[in-house]
Amino acid sequence: MTMRFLRYHRRMQPQNLTELLSRLWHGADYNYEQWLEFPDVLHEDFRLMNLAHCTAMSVGIFSWAKLEPREGQYDFRWLDALMDDLHGHGIRAILATPSAAHPAWLSARVPEVQRMNHLGQREPHRGRQNFCRTSPVFREKVTAINTLLADRYKDHPALLLWHVSNEYGSTVCYCPTCLADFRRWLAARYGDLDGVNRAWWTTFWSHTYTDWDEIDPVDPSNNGLLLDWQRYNSDQVLDFYRMECAPLRQLTPHIPLTTNFMRPDVGLDYWKIAEHIDIVCWDSYPEWHVHDDVQTACETAFYHDLHRGYKQGQPFYLLESSPSQTNWQPLSRLKRPGMVKLASAQALAHGAMGVNYFQWRQSRGGEEKFHGAVVAHRGGENTRTFREVVEVGEMLAGMPALAAARTPARVGIIYDFENEWALGLAHLPRKVNKEYQATCIEHYTAFWRRGIPVDVINARQDFSKYALVIAPMLYLLSEETATRLTEFVRAGGTLVTTYMTGWVNESDLTHLGASPLEAVWGFKLVEYDTFGADQAGQVMCTAGNTLDLIGSARCGRFADLLEPTTAEVLAVYARDFYGTQAALTVNAYGQGKAYHLGTQVDEPFLGAFYEKLTRALGLFPLLTGLPHGVSAQARQTERQQFLFLMNFTNQTQTISVEETATDLPPYGVRIVVKDVEII
Amino acid sequence: MTMRFLRYHRRMQPQNLTELLSRLWHGADYNYEQWLEFPDVLHEDFRLMNLAHCTAMSVGIFSWAKLEPREGQYDFRWLDALMDDLHGHGIRAILATPSAAHPAWLSARVPEVQRMNHLGQREPHRGRQNFCRTSPVFREKVTAINTLLADRYKDHPALLLWHVSNEYGSTVCYCPTCLADFRRWLAARYGDLDGVNRAWWTTFWSHTYTDWDEIDPVDPSNNGLLLDWQRYNSDQVLDFYRMECAPLRQLTPHIPLTTNFMRPDVGLDYWKIAEHIDIVCWDSYPEWHVHDDVQTACETAFYHDLHRGYKQGQPFYLLESSPSQTNWQPLSRLKRPGMVKLASAQALAHGAMGVNYFQWRQSRGGEEKFHGAVVAHRGGENTRTFREVVEVGEMLAGMPALAAARTPARVGIIYDFENEWALGLAHLPRKVNKEYQATCIEHYTAFWRRGIPVDVINARQDFSKYALVIAPMLYLLSEETATRLTEFVRAGGTLVTTYMTGWVNESDLTHLGASPLEAVWGFKLVEYDTFGADQAGQVMCTAGNTLDLIGSARCGRFADLLEPTTAEVLAVYARDFYGTQAALTVNAYGQGKAYHLGTQVDEPFLGAFYEKLTRALGLFPLLTGLPHGVSAQARQTERQQFLFLMNFTNQTQTISVEETATDLPPYGVRIVVKDVEII
Amino acid sequence: MTMRFLRYHRRMQPQNLTELLSRLWHGADYNYEQWLEFPDVLHEDFRLMNLAHCTAMSVGIFSWAKLEPREGQYDFRWLDALMDDLHGHGIRAILATPSAAHPAWLSARVPEVQRMNHLGQREPHRGRQNFCRTSPVFREKVTAINTLLADRYKDHPALLLWHVSNEYGSTVCYCPTCLADFRRWLAARYGDLDGVNRAWWTTFWSHTYTDWDEIDPVDPSNNGLLLDWQRYNSDQVLDFYRMECAPLRQLTPHIPLTTNFMRPDVGLDYWKIAEHIDIVCWDSYPEWHVHDDVQTACETAFYHDLHRGYKQGQPFYLLESSPSQTNWQPLSRLKRPGMVKLASAQALAHGAMGVNYFQWRQSRGGEEKFHGAVVAHRGGENTRTFREVVEVGEMLAGMPALAAARTPARVGIIYDFENEWALGLAHLPRKVNKEYQATCIEHYTAFWRRGIPVDVINARQDFSKYALVIAPMLYLLSEETATRLTEFVRAGGTLVTTYMTGWVNESDLTHLGASPLEAVWGFKLVEYDTFGADQAGQVMCTAGNTLDLIGSARCGRFADLLEPTTAEVLAVYARDFYGTQAALTVNAYGQGKAYHLGTQVDEPFLGAFYEKLTRALGLFPLLTGLPHGVSAQARQTERQQFLFLMNFTNQTQTISVEETATDLPPYGVRIVVKDVEII
């Protein structure tokens, strides 16, 4: 049964997606079913939702045991009441399918729904998201309950959006069903075992497979195997998701579907999954006030831009965020006054279509009872948190036109999951801190600090809309992507690459012969050095280079030693025995240029590099003279620009907008709406 | 069979308890059976015991394989000889039951006596205390051997005390017998599954149970389940202990029973177990000379007071201590000259009735051969250690009247195991270093430094005998305890509470509505902040407050933000956005007062607070002007006070006793006996 | 079947060993079979090998799946071609047996060839060296393929040396076959269970065994058991090796046999295994440029001397080394110019007969594709690495006479595996950082810095050829070794021992009565202290001591407190309460002297001690006035001395050879050949 959905054809866009995208939304996860014995609490909840300008609540997320208290005995009465109550208060429902937490009776009756570890032991029932995704029984039960939900609420006026399951992860299962499915997936990918052996270079250490059943994804010395196992598990999640969607699509073709994403560290290829959802939703929990807030803000901006990117710029829904603290991070501090609004505004600035919280009301028991909520254990509307949530509601209600506005970016930074996995698995001369994601964010930071909009983009997409494409540490580089990058430069684009780029193809095999980017780069890579945490190198600009870049920088992590052929050397190393070799080059290729940063330079140097480069490319900041910690982001329609000016410091900052100095208070935001004419 | 002892009625006090409590004892763990092939060694042992003034030796602790070398073939001849030899040398026996280490043949014949892990695998036979406590076969074998021991030695004149097993821990077993027993325990506690579901708030994440067999105590997301599993395992140990006792009580009703406790970190509710033992014994291994000795001394004092508290002030027996080093701590340094006597005197000062060592003689092989002992591998009586042990023996022999003296404390600090477990399990905005025990010790330190006696007390006990009760971090607060605390204040008592108090009830459910202490406190808790390791807040006293407290303090860990209703604000926060909110309050309630410390203040401030408070309450130090590192503790009878003055520094310290300056050498102790008249 | 080889008689020396030892060799591991589809690559390989002066290549190491693609279907054609190609290019073959990585089909067909964990679960097939060494089927399959290899190539002119398996480790297996074999091994060692119980002191904690089947090597509290389990596993590897050798010895009696060793941390008693190999080979991967290079050089020198010691001074083969980086160490930096030659010269200086690399060519896929190689993914002969390898080839080709030269050492430092294991298992007052190996290297360093040759020697060997024997931390000291050390001193030798020496016998039982070295030492050990990482003691020389040693030192780790009887005190402690007790003693015994260092002194003091001692003993440096970081090592024949002068710093160093100042460039080496006359 598994995988039958993967080749599913691109379907029609759900009718109600237009409505969904035409407004800004506000709401929270609501666990109505926990309080059925406390009617006063429920009554108070709806009064407070209206006070807080809530328009869309996520419901039913973990309700399976309540919907099907005994196998086959369903009880929808409480959900009927909830849907009606929402409708009665003018609030829409983001209705979840309940697969994320299945009842204990199901694991007890059918042990095979539980995952198996690599030694063949079934994991005990516990927590949530603990099921085997290929279990036929589990899939049947999910299909049954999803069908009943879709059939029951297909015409309910409150129904806005399907929230399929919750926070899918990629935890693996080694049961026979999953392994058989993996082997079928491999057969589909490689044709036969010869193809597998060739792709994984199994002559190494006698790893040749002679029978499909010999393939067991537990060999840490077989990178190709583990990379494919990771790909398979991501695809398995996608397949499970699509299995969940089938009855929803069939019975409610007008209702959009989504599932909530998380930060890009969970082992899923969200680029691929995003093709099968209607809107991108994500759950963002920055650790405000724990680290440097400016750094936290910049990272959060990167994640927002990434989520906007998943569907090529279509607004995303911030579906979970904490209006106060969390209770699962190492440390979670009280949000400083203004922070809830600022964090919500930041999401909007980067393309959000709505802001929801986890959770509406703190639960009385269980693991998340001390997770922050709009409504705390005590205090109701008389809390600082509630008042700030009301302000967010007012902000959202106050600018309906933002819904149609989009982000104007001409810079694209590639973020690639397969590359991240392959790098993570790679056995390199430096074992720790490869820092793929951190490196992408380092490059992103140069733009964020300057108020130049950036798209975070897919390596598999068309690059022609960008003036500048940055591909940090693109270790895994297929011939196909190399060709598209080459074409991009030839046609006039500017490409920036770094150390450790293009080392292997999609099977983690090194490219034979010349690197696929060698012509574009205009150099040969001859050696690469590494630096320990307490070691550093140095680079120094060459006199009179064409980018007009001056000065020197500390460098670290990795150092490509380059032998230029046609490239111009912009900077050389200034330490160690390779102290005069090329560290930063540019090569004119076709109508465009390819820059290569052979080592990780310090932030001032990287900033200066992009400063010169963007100026040369005519990529101008939204606002000049931004103080440190103030971010400028814009969305625009054909007629209006919404300029968000956000202060992520705990000091008042003075900015100048259209020649008028204005103060942004600590953690303050100002949204400037201007009429513009976009040509 | 399990649990049938738990409702056992309170029995008569054993006849010989009075004798036991009327003397001071001295001795060690003695592994006679390891040296049967070395008669000269045994002969030398008894000579040395007499030299060292030994009066009570612990014997037979790990002797099962020697007593029952083959199943059902018992051999008591060597133990007969040992008991007779002890008697012949005027020494009494603390005779152990041998359950702590069962023979390999038992595990080999009956695998079910071994524990099972949570994946259903039997743990291999190894170490000690590695049995399943509900195994019927294991219980039968223990009953059989305990019965034989009791029957054989019931009239032996050496027999002083039963040492039941050794250092019970709470390591869990997931075998079917244990799980069934746990479910019966739950049924007894909650009546039915509805009760369980309600208590554990199982609507959260669809955790509802529909059958008892679904309950598997491996779900880290179900706090209520894990808290009850911890309670159950403590009760299971108690039940096992009582099963062990049954034949001893029946055949030797005159002989007292005990089992040796450890530091309060082993997962047992010693308050509950203490109800079923006749005297409290404990094994104390402070890490002298490894950390700050003054801090080590203060912590050790706390543990001594806790063990005195377990039976409401009755003297405890220091049943294990090292006369030199240990071999299981990360680092164990040689005890500096005087330290053995000082550490022994400290135990006496805090209520000990005897001082024993682990171990009498270093063994030749096995894991503990390099653990310190009275008799080392080489040296016999000609070692520094042996000479210091002789001095301890002389000290004990020199003050028989101390046996009847008790500690005069009017301050009680609550230490609660269920609270510790619940806090440990709680998912809070700060994951690490909740520091419940450390916080109790921080409050204790203020008194220890000032020479004001303290009892460490049970949250379930009557508080009326105390002038001051301190309840640090009493996160888990049942309505019942809240009521007793309220009554205590109403009747004129003074209560001190801290941040994170009274958040949940005994099922780890948050209290609905107002906090049960809100009226006593006179404030509402509105928010709480947390601090990372490198972050700090500040508090500042209000001008002219009624406690006359002045100055400011750094604060950390947690910060309650309070909204006073009737309470007086003694100190406010002086940093962060809540920089003027109440941090320390006092509320007059009935005849008493309730103080609340909303944050963890630094030691000088906490000391100043208790200085003012104890002065206001008329709680005076035993000796004023104590130098740093000198501790003053007292025990008294109706006629005499024994004042222990102990120098825990490596410097000579000068103290003034009754207007005479006197020097305490490094690690020196002075015991001043005064005639007093207690009204 | 297992173990039948252990009592195998000492056989004749293989005829071709003489040839092997008469030359210096150069080569690399060559994975020809990975490139069969790329004939151009293979063609280029042989051309480059000749360019690099390669004379011996290791082949077939992981080729089982290629040699036996399906069970029983063998294919030697590619290996025939390889052997012929090597021969055709004048290169010899170090031909491996392929057991180190067995094919997946074997694990799939016979699960028992996989190891079992201590809970009875079979480990999955993965990585390499993952088989059960007692599996009868595995042994049959290995015997079969080894027989075929030996038979096929017995007369091939390229065949130089058998490379049996690869890097045997000691990972344990708990399957019934292994456990039964272990119990038979114990029966052979101890006769009966009484012997076992006695040796392991099982009366402790009721650990007495009453049946062989009760013995399960998983009890961390039974040191004797775990020490024997470690010994057994080392013997099991040896037995497996000898099983592998049987057909090779039978069919190719003229060909020498070896297996490649690693650093002495893998759990094998290489002293014992070395008795059954013809030449010692080892794989050395120092972390150059990551830590202090001088320290790295000294440690590497120690390992080289240890490997030269395994066969009592016979040259060893450096069979693996990286010509550039590795990809399995935490950090591996580019080798600075000269480093490949310097590291190769260092091996030669300490007794190498050849220098090989891992690997010839970087593989295209698999775990080691980014491990350094002579031929990199790109670059061929036009790389810095290739050029430096050529220089090494020229150096080797340039001094054929070195092959016959041996190291002239009169100092022996004992390094004992059983002691290392016993110390590792021992539960001492200091749990961490016992540092046995580091301590041996600390003592070694004093000689390395001074250019005084040292042998690293076996505790079980004859000491009479040495003037000075050093036995650091010889915790496990059998009566037999104690007797040989005593005789050595009595006969005029000088012995240096340290703290923690002679505590236990070969069964980890403490010696009863006096220490076996007490008479030699002339003192009694009365107590021992330990120091934490941030604690230190001090020692101070006594005035006018006979060694003329002056000054004081910081000391740490451990401190023996000694009570001299006949010994002279050279230094006392100068801190803590034992501040006047003996710390360093010398005792005249018979014709010799025994020095004892009671504590770990700092490096300057240890250096000064050995400076005085070697001068007193007439042990002179090869060259005086060596700058820090320059090492002088010598090999000599009856006619010539080869003096290696090696600069392990990144600065030019000036040395004076025969009164002429000469410069050694950074990482430079100079080899001075002098005619000498050895009497």
Image (tube, coloured by chain):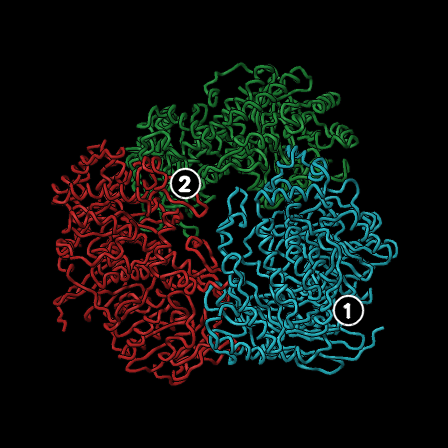
Chain colours: A red, B green, C cyan
Q: Is residue B35 left or right of residue B645?
A: right
In which quadrant of the rendered image does the C terminus of chain A lie? bottom left
* Residue B530 sits above or below residue C374 on the image: above
| Towards the viewer: A551 or C647 | C647
Residue B371 placement: quadrant: top right
Given the image, on which type of amino acid does mark 1 rest? Pro
Question: Residue C596 in the image: x percent, y percent?
Answer: 77, 54
Mark 2 highlights which residue? B549
| Towards the viewer: B210 or B263 | B210
Mark 1 highlights which residue? C408
Question: Residue C498 in the image: x percent, y percent?
Answer: 73, 53
| Residue drawn at x 22%, y 43% as measured from the top left | A146
Question: Residue C344 in the image: x percent, y percent?
Answer: 63, 72
| Towards the viewer: B535 or A214 | A214
Q: Specify the farthest residue to the right.
A: C591
Given the image, on which type of amino acid does mark 2 rest? Leu
* Residue B263 sits above or below residue B675 on the image: below
| Towards the viewer: B626 or A427 | A427
Give the number of callouts. 2
What chain does mark 2 sit on?
B
Report helix, strand or loop for mark 1.
loop
* Residue A406 sits above or below residue B401 on the image: below
Residues at discs 2 and 1 in contact (Cβ within 8 Å): no
Report helix, strand or loop for mark 2.
loop
Q: Is residue C451 left or right of residue A308?
A: right
Residue A516 placement: quadrant: bottom left
* Residue C230 sits above or below residue C665 on the image: above
Between the C-alphas of marks 2 and 1, the distance is 79 Å
What chain does mark 1 sit on?
C
Question: Residue B251 in the image: x percent, y percent?
Answer: 60, 15
Q: Is residue C524 left or right of residue C140?
A: right
